[in-house]
């Protein structure tokens, strides 16, 4: 047939691959192993273009590796716990489980339509007891290894809904449902001791050569190692010598003579002590606690302070007193929950000092001459110490070392390495998550659930009619006997952060026995993941937690892998124009029509539409394009091809009608070539060389995840074949073309392969090799100038003689036209480069 029909072919080959179990990963295969993984999706409802792009990239690599002779593991599953399912339960009255499983079914069917080379036999969903039960076992392992702690920590509290809110549920300081101003509230919660691994996690970044630099840098900053000084201030009212009243941590000991106040967190024990006796302090603390707990919320909130009236003594001067304030920007769980403020050189301190009229001193300047320059904004750059007594003139780093040295010698402070990284709070006061396998007993304290009672399964009979955690109000679920003393006890009703689920799914993909989380020997055959592909939004949390989890398993002797992801690639987003109606509504591309002259109108009303910016596809801007109708119309390969073709994969890809149509045309062009008669004779050396070059270029591009480059090389080869005369070389070129397009357009490749009566499926074919000798260019392009001006070029064999080059140049029609029938006065030839004709 003269047209490739994806409606028939897609289905056919998907079925064949399925029947042949082509993409099943055999852990016992003697072949070298390759593990290709894309971040597994959250089953939100339907596949979106971002998924399609992400999974197409991984698929091309997985298919390429398979053709290269690797045993490939390319699995798929579902990050299935989380808030949206509970929101759906509250809004639509469907059970989170039913909602999630239905979405999984839809999205699985959609992914299958795109023809991804996935090992579906390893599919998993984190919301199934068969997954989270093993996670509970791992949690118990961590508990036994001392890597789990329970401590008080602040959560976002919605005082109207009387519920804990996730950070995402706090919008501009208010609860997303109630609109009430959110408060910070202390709760006892479970933490994983990721801080024990801070140095290791930082160090390990150095070995991740195949990670983007920007991601490594983001992790480094997140871990935030800083060298500083921890020391005690003595209250002016306490006796001199040895008293530690307020301990502070600073990374800038060099600025100690610029201190103008000491600030403590609203949660600091001294603040709480003062509040007990003074209602105005209690009232201030309540006010300071309003607003969310996220760093961004605290950073942007207005600075609030309360002068306690207390004073402390400067460590270098017994007569120097500093006032003690309670300030909302001081975090309780960082450093010591207290600091000394240096408004001249710290942005937050500056803002605070201006508001409360505290002194602003300059103690750092570019040079000693700048000592009296006024401070008009916090000057955070290093320089030399000024107005700082014995430190004057010292560069910042020396001054820092000097203060630490003096503090340590005199015994009032110690140099300290500090990490910004906090322990990982994993308690969520939610239903749709992995139940934390702990039982609380009044006499025994928290006790791990005995392993033979795992999994602790979520109860199905829950209601979402009122806010809060349904597990808390379930009539029976939490009432259990203490596993230790047998007395009445209470099941933990917090569930695990969903980032725990995604911290080890790649291990479970590699090995999934029924009786344990994974089989060590089998998992180690596959791990680490060779290439991990996903969104840059996971650059910090997910990737850091997974690294931690892997190292924790390693430390516990359960896995000898230190880094889970050897290669990481963060792909760009899929974007689309936005459209806005005359009355300011965002319109979906479906709702508009292009009239003559490119004028956009709203289909329903005929009113003009404003073309907005190109932005990431999102529901809120209504600029999404649903992949499914596109698949119906163009077939899987055109969609896949477009995802690969238009932009470098790390950049954004703008969805366009023209782009998908171009991809669809390419599919048909390849198909038409494949239908040309075979059995031709004769050699076409130029074409053969082009084929070898393309094999080399496409292989190198896919290896480097530069899919757009591989596409460009294939466009070139296709055009070259189209231009060539029938020959044995051309037959061979078409065959190779099919092998090269197979990772990107596998249905087309299979259908064409079969139509040419090739053996077996292309999915089982080997990647073509190339002859390096054929890569060397033996033709050159020679510039032809007339009177020094470029007029034309010619292609000639390398090493063409001066005489031949001159003759070829003079025979060019454009040059003859330039000469107008006259003989040239002189001809200068630079062999293989240039012919210059002087007329
Ligand atoms: C004096 C000073 C002077 C500071 C100066 C900075 C600049 P990093 O570098 O992020 O680790 N700090 C200490 N504990 C804090 C807390 N619980 N909440 C908020 N801020 C706190 O930050 C360390 C710096 O953050 C410390 O150094 C302290 O302010 C502040 F020109 O001390 B600095
Ligand atoms: Zn007990």
Image (spheres, rainbow, N blue to C red):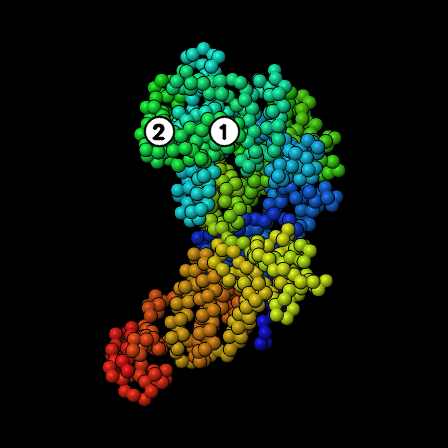
Q: Which quarter of the rendering shows the C terminus?
A: bottom left
Tell me which residue sits at (41%, 40%) in the image: 204
- Place of residue 562 in the rendered image (x, y in percent of width and height, measured from the top left): 44, 40
User: Could you say which is closer to the camera, residue 670 or residue 680?
Assistant: 670
Tell me which residue sits at (67%, 24%) in the image: 489
Q: Is mark 1 on a helix, strand or loop?
A: helix
Labels 1 & 2 near each other (Cβ < 8 A): no
Q: Earlier in the sequence, mark 1 or mark 2?
A: 1
Packing grade of label 2 (10 A; few <14, some 14-19, many >=20) is many
User: Could you say which is closer to the camera, residue 274 or residue 193?
Assistant: 274
User: Could you say which is closer to the camera, residue 460 or residue 465?
Assistant: 465
Q: What element carries label 2?
A: loop
Q: Give the numbered dot on residue 353.
A: 1
Q: How many labels does the image show?
A: 2
Question: Quick check: 503 left or right of 212?
Answer: right
Q: Classify 431 as above or below 769.
A: above
- Place of residue 156 in the rendered image (x, y in percent of width and height, measured from the top left): 62, 33
Q: Name the residue under label 2.
A: 386
- Place of residue 575 in the rendered image (x, y in percent of width and height, measured from the top left): 56, 56
Q: Classify 524 as above or below 299.
A: below
Q: Is residue 189 visible?
A: no
- Place of residue 33 in the rendered image (x, y in percent of width and height, measured from the top left): 46, 51
Q: Which quarter of the rendering shows the N terminus?
A: bottom right
Q: Give the numbered dot on residue 700.
A: none
Q: Can residue 288 be seen in this view?
A: yes
Kindly indicate the quadrant of the structure image that contains residue 803. bottom left
Q: Classify 187 as above or below 641.
A: above
Instruction: Measure the C-alpha gap from mark 1 to mark 2.
Output: 20 Å
Q: Residue furthest bottom?
A: 821
């Amino acid at each position: 047939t003269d047209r490739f029909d994806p409606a028939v072919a897609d289905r056919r080959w998907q079925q064949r691959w399925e029947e042949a179990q082509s993409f099943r990963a055999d852990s016992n295969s003697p072949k070298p192993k390759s593990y290709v993984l894309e971040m597994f999706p959250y089953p939100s409802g339907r596949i979106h273009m971002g998924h399609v792009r992400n999974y197409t990239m991984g698929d091309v690599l997985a298919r390429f590796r398979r053709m290269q002779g690797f045993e490939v593991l390319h699995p798929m599953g579902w990050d299935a716990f989380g808030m949206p399912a509970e929101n759906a339960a509250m809004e639509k009255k469907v059970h989170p489980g039913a909602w999630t499983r239905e979405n999984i079914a839809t999205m699985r069917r959609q992914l299958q339509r795109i023809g991804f080379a996935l090992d579906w036999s390893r599919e998993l969903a984190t919301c199934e007891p068969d997954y989270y039960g093993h996670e509970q076992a791992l949690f118990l392992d961590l508990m036994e290894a001392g890597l789990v702690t329970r401590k008080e920590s602040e959560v976002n509290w919605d005082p109207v809904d009387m519920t804990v809110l996730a950070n995402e549920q706090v919008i501009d300081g208010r609860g997303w449902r109630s609109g009430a101003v959110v408060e910070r509230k202390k709760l006892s919660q479970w933490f994983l001791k990721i801080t024990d691994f801070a140095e290791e996690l930082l160090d390990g970044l150095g070995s991740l050569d195949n990670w983007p630099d920007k991601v490594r840098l983001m992790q480094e900053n997140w871990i935030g190692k800083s060298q500083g000084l921890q020391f005690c201030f003595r209250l002016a009212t306490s006796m001199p010598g040895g008293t530690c009243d307020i301990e502070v941590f600073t990374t800038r000991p060099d600025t100690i003579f610029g201190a103008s106040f000491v600030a403590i967190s609203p949660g600091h024990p001294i603040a709480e002590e003062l509040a007990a006796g003074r209602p105005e302090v209690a009232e201030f603390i309540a006010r300071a606690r309003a607003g969310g707990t996220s760093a961004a919320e605290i950073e942007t909130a207005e600075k609030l302070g309360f002068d306690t009236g207390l004073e402390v003594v400067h460590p270098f001067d017994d007569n120097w007193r500093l006032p003690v304030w309670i300030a909302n920007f001081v975090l309780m769980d960082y450093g010591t929950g207290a600091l000394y403020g240096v408004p001249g050189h710290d942005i937050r301190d500056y803002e605070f000092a201006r508001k409360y009229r505290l002194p602003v001193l300059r103690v750092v300047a570019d040079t000693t001459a700048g000592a009296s320059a006024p401070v008009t904004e916090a000057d955070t750059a290093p320089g030399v110490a000024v107005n700082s007594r014995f430190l004057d003139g010292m560069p910042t780093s020396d001054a820092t070392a000097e203060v630490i040295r003096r503090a340590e010698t005199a015994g009032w402070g110690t140099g300290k390495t500090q990490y910004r990284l906090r322990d990982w709070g994993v308690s969520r006061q939610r239903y749709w998550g992995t139940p934390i396998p702990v039982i609380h007993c009044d006499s025994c304290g928290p006790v791990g659930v005995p392993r033979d009672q795992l999994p602790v399964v979520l109860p199905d009979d829950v209601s979402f009619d009122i806010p809060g955690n349904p597990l808390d109000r379930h009539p029976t679920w939490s009432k259990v006997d203490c596993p230790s003393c047998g007395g009445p006890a209470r099941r933990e009703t917090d569930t695990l952060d969903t980032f725990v689920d995604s911290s080890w799914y790649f291990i479970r993909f590699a090995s999934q026995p029924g009786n344990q989380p994974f089989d060590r020997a089998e998992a180690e055959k596959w791990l680490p993941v060779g290439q991990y592909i996903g969104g840059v939004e996971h650059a910090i949390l997910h990737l850091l937690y997974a690294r931690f989890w892997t190292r924790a398993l390693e430390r516990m002797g359960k896995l000898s892998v230190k880094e889970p992801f050897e290669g990481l690639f963060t792909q760009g987003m899929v974007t689309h124009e936005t459209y806005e109606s005359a009355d300011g509504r965002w319109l979906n591309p479906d709702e508009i029509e292009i009239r003559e002259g490119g004028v956009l109108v709203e289909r329903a009303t005929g009113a003009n539409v404003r073309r907005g910016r190109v932005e990431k596809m999102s529901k809120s801007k209504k600029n999404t394009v649903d992949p499914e109708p596109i698949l119906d119309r163009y077939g899987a390969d055109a969609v896949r091809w477009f995802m690969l073709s238009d932009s470098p994969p790390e950049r954004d890809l703008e969805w366009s009608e023209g782009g998908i149509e171009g991809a669809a045309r390419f599919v048909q062009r390849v198909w038409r070539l494949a239908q040309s008669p075979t059995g031709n004779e004769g050699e076409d050396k130029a074409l053969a060389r082009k084929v070898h070059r393309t094999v080399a270029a496409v292989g190198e591009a896919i290896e480097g995840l530069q899919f757009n480059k591989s596409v460009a090389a294939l466009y070139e080869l296709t055009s070259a074949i189209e231009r060539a005369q029938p020959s044995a070389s051309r037959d061979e070129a078409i065959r190779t073309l099919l092998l090269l397009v197979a990772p990107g357009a596998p249905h087309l490749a299979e259908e064409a392969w079969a139509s040419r009566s090739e053996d077996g499926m292309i999915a089982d074919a080997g990647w073509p090799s190339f002859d390096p000798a054929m890569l060397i260019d033996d033709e050159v392009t020679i510039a032809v100038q007339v009177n020094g001006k470029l007029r034309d070029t010619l292609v000639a064999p390398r090493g063409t003689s001066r005489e031949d080059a001159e003759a070829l140049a003079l025979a060019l029609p454009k040059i003859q036209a330039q000469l107008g029938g006259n003989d040239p006065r002189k001809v200068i030839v630079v062999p293989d480069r240039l012919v210059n004709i002087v007329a």
